[in-house]
Amino acid sequence: MMNPKLTSEITCPECGHREVETMPEDACQYFYECKHCKALIKPKQGDCCVFCSYGDTPCPPIQLDQSCC
């Protein structure tokens, strides 16, 4: 069993700010507040979390081919 990558660079869809964040290993993160413009970001329709929508790495459960949420 592989170990998932636990960090992802998330890009704010409102202002384009990028931030490297640590992802939760066993849960989805549905909301994320941009550290630059303070926008509250939610996942795109069909995605389980903000990292799957706006990160450069999908969340750990998706990396491991497990159901998420």
Image (spheres, rainbow, N blue to C red):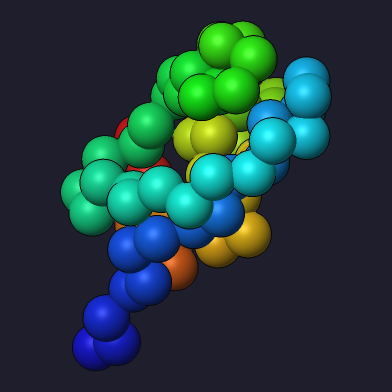
Q: Is residue 66 left or right of residue 48?
A: left
- When asked about the image quadrant of residue 11, the answer is top right
Residue 65 seen anywhere in this rendered image of the structure: no
Would you place residue 23 above or below residue 48 in this image? below
Is 66 left or right of 13, judged from the image as shown?
Answer: left
Residue 52's x, y, as percent? 58, 47
Q: Which corner quadrant of the image does residue 19 belong to?
A: top right
Residue in the image at 34% along x and 49% along y = 23
Residue reaching furthest to the front: 36
Q: From this viewpoint, which residue is outermost toward the bottom?
A: 1
- Residue at (24, 88) in percent of width and height: 1
Q: Position of residue 17 (x, y in %)?
A: 69, 35
Camera sees residue 29: yes
Q: Indicate whether 30 appears above or below 37.
A: below
Q: What residue is drawn where x is 49% and y is 18%?
A: 33
The correct choice, above or below, for 22 with respect to 42 in the image is below
Res 59 → quadrant? bottom left
Report the side of 59 relative to 54 (left or right): left
Which is nearer the eye, 57 or 64?
57
Taking depth in this image into account, of 64 and 3 the one nearest to the observer is 3
Which residue is pictured at 55% across the width and 62% down the height? 57
* Relative to 56, 13 lies left or right: right
Across and down, in percent, residue 50 comes to: 54, 34
Q: Quadrant location of the C terminus?
A: top left
Image label count: 0
